[in-house]
Image (spheres, grey):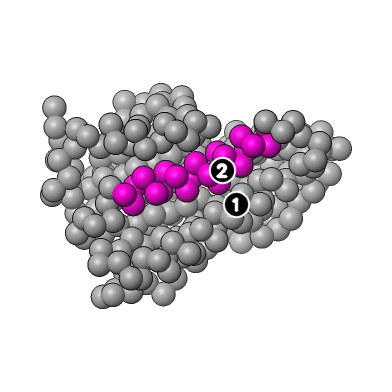
Amino acid sequence: MTSSPRSLALVTGGSRGLGHQICLQLREQGFQVQEFSRAAPHPWSVMLDLGRPQDIRPTLDRALGDLDLDGLDRLVVVGNAGSLAPIGPSWRQPREALRQHLQINLGSAIEFYDAVLAHFQHRPVVRKVIGHITSGAAHRPHAGLSLYGATKAGMEQYIRALAEEQRSQAHPFTAVALDPGALDTDMQAQIRAAAVEDLPVVTDFINRQRQGRLRDPAVVAHTLVAALLSPTLEPGPGSPADHAGASVHLQPAAPALH
């Protein structure tokens, strides 16, 4: 049956952790949520393997095909999907693992946003926001996280450039990158399990967890969604808000990986 949402959210990597909490917060705010992930465990999930970029646009086309979008007032797109592995110097990694990391964290993230832009760029939706979840690793180099840091930094630059491109659009998106800080998620557990020869600072991450310095994903998701829905993120007449394209740091702390 065709639905006619007034508020629609498209979220990648929302099967668990921070992404799942973002979905829950958006649903509480009245959004119809479509969550895209390989696991697709929720009633609002759509199965999508970002390691298969050829599936991205057809999957999004099908997901949006049953929606009547003519009455849409608010569109929020959150890119949370990402891969941490492989940990360790890139030159020691299997070539296929390296290529998959770059594809999921950089190539497919951009392709998903491109597919969204193809659908919605020319629609006169009142509010259109893209929020990409970034990391302190985009700015603070850690030995063993060269691939992860590079892809996070690359996506931040993409978001900055996208925000500039939107300045000339009649119906612009606001695009921002959001750094949630260090969270108590499976990704942090994966970091703590790394061998010291792969991640020399692994003890710092272990101590961070022991000292209770990891944030609750539900609390962070509340702050993040509030930022995405804030009127200060609205583009003004003919131009985005001043901080469109900037990194919004919800917790300035190091080492920070969500």
Is the C terminus in the top left, top right, bottom left or bottom right quadrant? Answer: top right
Q: Residues within 10 Å of mark 1 (few under 14, many from 20)?
A: many
Residue behind mark 2: 105
Question: Sequence order check: which comes first, mark 1 or mark 2?
Answer: 2
Q: Residue at x 41, y 48 (%)?
A: 113
Locate residue 69, reporting x and y percent. Answer: 17, 45
According to the picture, the residue beneath numbered tag 1 turns out to be 152
Q: CA distance from mark 1 to mark 2?
A: 7 Å
Residue 218 visible at all: no
Looking at this view, is 207 or 241 the one in front?
241
Q: Residue at x 76, y 34 (%)?
A: 93
- Identify which amino acid the numbered label 2 is placed on: Asn
* Magenta stretch contains residue 109: yes
Q: Quadrant of residue 105?
A: top right
CB-based contact (under 8 Å), mark 1 and mark 2: yes
Q: From the viewer's perspective, is 250 left or right of 76?
A: right
Residue 244: x %, y % from top left: 42, 67
User: Residue 140, percent across and down?
Assistant: 70, 58
* Numbered range of the magenta stretch: 97-118
Q: Residue at x 68, y 37 (%)?
A: 98
